Amino acid sequence: MKKIWLLIAAVAIVSCKNEAPIKYAVLTGKITNKLPGEFTVNSMDRSFKETIEIAEDGSFVDTLTLKAGTYMLYDGKNATPVYLSEGFNVNVAYDANDFKNTLAFTGEGSEISNYLQAKSKTEKEIMGEGMGVYELEEDEYKAKFNEIKTALNNLLTSTEGISEEFKSKEQRNINYGYLKSINIYERYHAHFAKKPEFKVSEGFLAELDGMDYSNEEDFLFSSDYKNLVSSHYFKQASKLAEKDSIDADLAFLKTAAQIQGETIKNSLLFENAKYGITYTENLEEYYTAFINASTNEDNKKEITETYNKLKVVAKGQPSPKFENYENYAGGTTSLDDLKGKFVYVDVWATWCGPCKAEIPYLKEVEAKYHDKNIEFVSISIDKAADHDKWKTMVEEKELKGVQLFADNDWNSQFVKDYLIKGIPRFILIDTEGNIVSSNAPRPSSPKLISLFNELNI
């Protein structure tokens, strides 16, 4: 009898242990022919990043404390979505030299990751290569994305091992993907079909009528729903900016401040402010508007830290310096070498489309002011591996002014001191090395010439 009671007690203890909730996900795997670079797990909103150590044989194991959701695995070249949640034990394996054909997920909870992989493949097969789908006319375009929606719903229904809770959310997500494609059509078709004046026909967006933009569960689950919500409030902000004659960035903060749901409001405010505050022309007003609108103390703390750093590069402050940057013309150049002249700095990279779009305008401004007391300095923040690509572009596009190559791409001290988080970025420095504007107008903006006139350049 005593042995029986001991056995019962042991079973009870084991049962208690088994019932204790697991507060982490386990990610294991092996990468054959591992490429140079970090192996990371990143959340889709960039709020979570974990670097995983890879053994010499390519194997790895890590426990991750995170929220349930889709994350991106990235090895420096290859990327794939993986769905992780508490209690999952997912194994990923592939050959880095043949990533597309060898990627495989196994283990507890891997069904969703396999579904996401199949989903991506299905979308690509139906859409075809390149951006040709956005050149389709309205009826063909809608038919194409309806075909995608139907195929994805069939795939989801036929996939076994996925919880009903996930399926329910994913069904809505698939529909949001379709609605997003409708929402972006006008802008994308105008660009890819080379019809800059294109407008969608009346009724094309009717499927968006009456949409609920306050579903916080879907906002956290679906990036497509999040995109639709963000687009909705940007449109409202645009109307407010025009009505009240205020800058678009301030109009967005004022619009987002009126959102009732705290999750959506704080997310849109923060994601806009993380980068927007480094670009705004009204730092004090922008910062005050954010602080008054946000109710998330962690977000307010981070934006306040950025605000305090930006005050160091405010108008009239001594400019941070770049030193001994490689000059395309030969030798090196430092900011101090240019003292006595105004310096208009263009921070750019060869891979940056908006940067390249400014080149013709920059050439025009340079030509107009070639005999004035101002130097036009372009600083490439390309990676060292793209050094030759930089030299080739300077030559082929016949770039003028002082062409420099930063010493450590995005991690260059000059870039970090100015809190540059997006490019192109333009900076104007006066003859004494003090900041005129850390967010100077772009060459394509008439405001730049107005600024030069104010300074009697």
Image: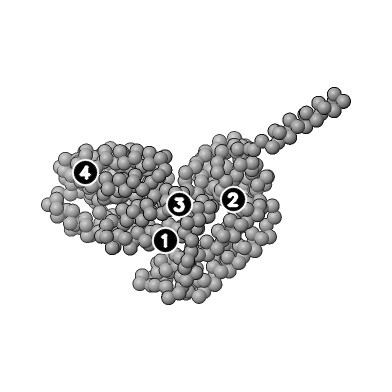
Residue at figure coordinates x 21%, y 39% from the top left: 317
Residue type marked 4: Lys
Question: How much space separates mark 3 and mark 4, taking CA atoms?
Answer: 37 Å
Q: Sequence order check: which comes first, mark 2 or mark 1?
A: 2
Question: How much space separates mark 3 and mark 1, taking CA atoms?
Answer: 15 Å
Q: Which mark is residue 315?
A: 4
Asked which quadrant contains residue 34, the reply is top right
Neighbours of disc 2 within 10 Å: few (<14), some (14-19), many (20+): some
Question: How much space separates mark 2 and mark 3, taking CA atoms?
Answer: 41 Å
Neighbours of disc 3 within 10 Å: few (<14), some (14-19), many (20+): few
Asked if disc 2 and disc 4 are in contact, CB closer than 8 Å, the reply is no
Q: Is residue 285 left or right of residue 122?
A: left
Of labels 1 and 4, the one closer to you? 1
Residue type marked 2: Phe
Q: Is residue 299 left or right of residue 78?
A: left
Q: Sequence order check: which comes first, mark 1 or mark 4?
A: 1
The front one of 87 and 405 is 87
Which SS class for mark 4? loop
Residue at figure coordinates x 59%, y 45% from the top left: 84
Q: How many marks?
A: 4
Report x, y in % for residue 120. Answer: 57, 58
**Which residue carries the number 1 mark?**
232
Residue type marked 1: His
Q: Which mark is residue 99?
A: 2
Report x, y in % for residue 64. Answer: 57, 38
